[in-house]
Structure formats: C-alpha cells, structure tokens
Image (tube, grey):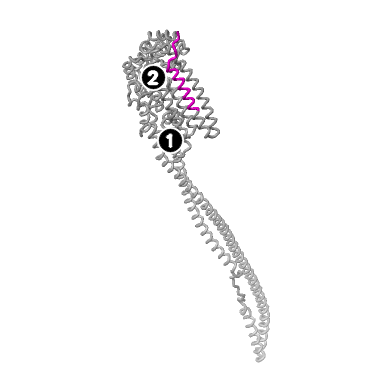
Amino acid sequence: MARPRPEWADYIVDSAHADTAALGATIAAEAQRSRRVQLEAARRQVEATQQQTVAIRETALAMQDAADRQVEAQYATAGVVAEVGASVDALADRVGDSLDLGFLRLQQTVDEGIATLDRNLDVLAGVMHGGFELVGQRMLEQTAVLGDIATMTANPLSTAAAEHYRRGVQSLQQRWLEEAIAELEQAVDKDRTNPAPHYALGVAKAASNEPADAFTALASAIKYSVADERWASLAASAAILLRSVAGPEQADEVARALDTALLVAPTCAELLLVRAAHLGSYDDLVAAFTLAPELALVAVQGGVPGAEEAAQSVHDDPAGPIRARREIQRIVASSGDPDFGSDAPPADVPQAMIGYPGWVRTVLPTIARHVRTGIPQRLEGAAAVASMTKAAADLGRITLAGAHDSLRGHERRRDEAAARVARNRAAVEAYRMLPPATATLEHEARASRGIRLFLRPLVALMLVILLTNVAGANTMVSVPAGIAAFVFAILLVVWLVKAFRALAEEREVVRREAATAQQIREHQVMLAQQQADRARDRAEGDLAAATATLTAMEQRVASEAARIAQLEAELDALDEEHRGASDAHAALVADTERFQRPILALLPSIERDRIRPLGDAL
C-alpha cells in the first residue's frame, strides 16, 4: 500500500506556487513602469519562472518517490526543506528590493542565483545533511569526470582494476546501477588503495539508496586520497557527498572525514562550507565565503546558522574579495580606459555575492590581462615612441647644426666671390680707361757725314779761287797756277759729284731708317694694343667667372637658408611630437600609479588558490 504524500511535499508545492505568484506579480508591476524591452524581458522571465515551477513540482514528486524508500531521511529533511522555502522567500524579497535598480539587473541576479544553486546542488545536499535526494540524478551526471580521475596520480590503477573501473563508470553513466556496483566492487578488491573506485562505488551505492554502504565507500575514498595532494578534488567531493548520505548518529565520523579531507584540500570553499554547516563554525563560513562568495546563497538556502552574518562580514571586509571587486570596478570606471571592458557594479550584497563567479569568469580576466600585459605593453610602446621622437629631434638638431655650418661656409665663399668680383670689375674698368697704346721707340734722322762730304770740294774751290787770283796777279806763275786751278776745278767737280752722290745715298739711308722706325713704332703700338686687349679680355673673363661664382654662391646661400628654415620647422614639429609623446608617456606612468598598481595589489584578494570539487569547475 502506497504511503500518503507527506506534508512537507505539499508545503514545497504550495510554497513554489506562492513564490511564483509573488515573483510574477512583482515582475508585472515593474514591467508597467519599464520600457518595451523591459516588458519583453519580463515576459521571458515569467515563462522561465513557470518552467522553474514545473521543475520544482517534478522535483517534489521525485522527492516523494524517494521518500517511499528512505522515510527516516525524509522526515529529517522536512524541517530543512521548510527552511529552504523560507530562504527562497527571503531571496525573493531581496530580489524585489533590487527592482529599483532596473528589471534587467533583477533578471541577471535571478539567473545567476539559479545557476549558482544548480552548480552547487551537491554542496547544498551536503550542507542540509541527509538531503542527498535533492541532487538526484545530479550526482550521476558528475560521473562524466570519473573516467579520467584515475589517471591523474602517480599510482594509477592496475590493469585488471582499471578495466573493472572503466566498465563500472560506463555503467554508472548509463544509470545501470547494479552492473556499476558489481564492476566497481571488483575494482576496489583488486586495488584497495586507489580512491577513485571507492568514490565511484560510493556514488553508485548512494544512487541505489544504500546510504550505509555509500558512507563506507566514500569514507575509504577520503582515507586513501590524502596520500596524494592531486586527489584533493576527489577528497572534497567525497566528504561533501559523505555528509549528504550520513545519518545523525554518524556526526562524529562525518566531522573526522571533513577534517581529513581538509588536510589535502584546505582551500576548498565548498568543503569549508559543509564543515561550517556540520560544526556550526563561523570561521569556516567566513573562510568559505572569502574563497567563493557565491556560496553564500547556498549557505542561506541550506539554513546554515550565521550564513547571512558571515556573508555580510565578507562583503564588508576591506581585504575581502567583494571589496576588492568593488574597488577594482571603481578604479576601472574612473580610468575611462575602454581596454578594461564594460563592467557594471553590483546593486546590493546578494548580487555582489551571487554574481561574483560570473564576474570572475567573464570580466576579471580582461581586467587582469590588461593590467598585466596591456598596460605594460602600452607603457613600453609609449616609452619607445618617446625615445624614438627624442632621437629624431636630436638628429634634427645635429642636421640643423650641420646646415648652419654649411651656410657659414657658403657665406664665406660668397663673400670671397664678391671680393673677387669687385677686384675684377675694377680691373676691367681700369683697362677700359687706359689711353690708346703708343710707341716708345724714338728715331732721330741725321746725316752723320753731311758737312764732311763737302770739305774736299770746298778746299778745291778755295784753291781754284786762290790759284786763279794768283795766276791773274802774277803772270810768271799764271800757267802753273792756271793749270793747278784747272786741276782743282776738275777735282772740285769730281768731288762735288761724289759729295752729292754720297749725300743722296745718306739721305736714302736716313729715309729707310725713318721708315723702319715707323714700322717698329707701329708694330710696338699693335703689340701694346693686343696686350691691352688680351689683359682686358682676361679681366672681363675673370669678372664673368667671379660673377658666376658669386651667383652660384648666392643661390647656395639662399638654398641653404631655405633648407635651414625647413629644418627648423621640422625640428619644431619633432620637438612638439616628442613633447606629446613624453606627455603621453607621463600620463601612462601616472595612470599606472593610479590604476594598474592598485588593481595589481587587489588581484591577490580575488585570484586565490582554490581547490574545487569534482564537476564544479567554473
């Protein structure tokens, strides 16, 4: 005869309906004040809530079926389930309060809360102690990781044990529990110190509603896992599931198992939370929430005493992850750096705790990558740009100094060319002002024997006259005197002829000498004129060459001056570019002090080494 449905199952269904109605009414009220896109989002949320209601109803029915097989565990769980309902109501109230920040943020909070609960159902079962039936098939779904865990240690399974283990895990994944148990028991018999078969056997026994055998197998898995720290995740999962199948009388054994598992997995937040729920340890709650703030929702749902206070304490802790997250978000918002990505701060404590893993998974990697790689690369690039612009400006100064030296050289050569032009122009003017060329040869025409030619005729004439007078006066000597006079008369004629002939010859010589002298003077004048013309032409050529050189030097000076003006403009641009690069580098250095260093100092508060149970990796 079937047992009647227990009261707690009806309470779950009624509470689910009440929660759905309240949440739907809240969504409808908010949708009336929202824009059209918010109304569409509200409609999708109502549909999701209805689907959640159906899932809760199916879960309640599954729990009722499980209650037929485990009555005592169900009665022990009834009170805890009621507390879960109350916690859901409280969560709904907090969600309703957050509507002032916008329905989209509300939807995000609800979705993240549901995802957190779904991801930690096995932890919730361990927290609730005896609520193993809440996870149902969830535990079997986690067996997807069991096929690999036996190969990750230094002491792998033996060949025979590995084959039984492989078949057992495959059967467990197919929900063939009897076959899985048989194979896993053989794997345990053939390799008793490997924790993997013990853990898989514990899962199979628990799924077969054999809590005592499941407890024993899981305890063995914990015992053998402490030998190797690489079994830490398995030890944590085994301890969490061990508490979910343990009875009240096994509280001390559970406590020892939790302590043992924490030896190899001291940073497993889920394990710390389960021990806090088991022992009522506030410090374990704070440690668990510090490692995984999202577990605060699981603790509240599980009714762990002091969970809300511990969550608030972790939220308010200046060195805690939530404050670190808020401070990082504040720094990112104030930086205005788009490379940090978009990051909206949480609205309240629940959203800060529930949305923490999603933020760590999606937003934090971008921020961490930017502060560790992006900003240093940007700073290095800015420093390189500043260095290159400085080198370019220095090179520009050197080039400008060389151009000034070249200009001074051109100006010096231009002045020298101008001086040569002035000298050559003066020489040309002097040559042009010279008088015509004259001969320097002076020729005086004279007869060297003019008087001497007529001395003998003159003497002869005088003798003729004398003899004639003598002959006329003295007859005695007239004949000799006459003859002598006649002879001298003949000599006079002869000598006169010779004298006139010699005189004519001498005059011809003088004439020829005068003609020769004239020719010489004319030749001298011609030579002097030619020499003057050549000197003037040479001076004019030198003037033309000097003028061309001066023109070329002036062009070079003008060209060099224009080049200097261009170089000065380029140098001003290079200096301006260097100042801009230096200012950009200085701004990046300042941003490094304002943004990068504080974020790097805050990252260790978030990026904590954490061991996760099997199947719960983010």
Q: Is residue 259 left or right of residue 139?
A: left
Q: Which residues are magenta?
A: 1-24
| Residue 551, visible in the rendered structure | yes
Can you say whether 339 is above or below 537 in the image? above
Which residue is pictured at 48% across the width and 27% down the height? Answer: 23
- Give the residue at mark 1: 329
Which x, y percent locates residue 288? 36, 26
Q: Amino acid at mark 2?
A: Gly
Task: Locate the N terminus and report the quarter of the image it occupies.
Answer: top left
Answer yes or no: is residue 230 visible: no
Specify the label residue 401 is tagged with. none
Mark whose residue sits in front, 2 or 1: 2
Closest to the observer: 109 or 331? Answer: 109
The rendered magenta stretch, by its main secondary structure, is classed as: helix
> In the image, residue 149 lies at what x, y percent?
41, 17
Mark 2: few/some/many CA within 10 Å (<14, 14-19, 20+): some
Q: Identify which residue is drawn at 46% across, 27% down.
A: 112
User: Which sits earlier in the primary sequence, circle 2 or circle 1?
Assistant: 2
> Is 312 included in the stretch rendered in magenta?
no
Whole-percent x and y of residue 318? 36, 34
Q: Nearer the viewer, residue 80 or 486?
A: 80
Q: Nearer the viewer, residue 283 or 367?
A: 283
**Relative vertical location of residue 171 with respect to residue 504 in this rendering, above or below:** above
Residue 197, above or below 25:
above
| Pointer 2 residue | 79
Q: Position of residue 392 (x, y in %)?
A: 47, 45
Q: Quadrant of residue 326?
A: top left
Could you tell whether 559 is left or right of 373 in the image?
A: right
Q: Quadrant of residue 134?
A: top left
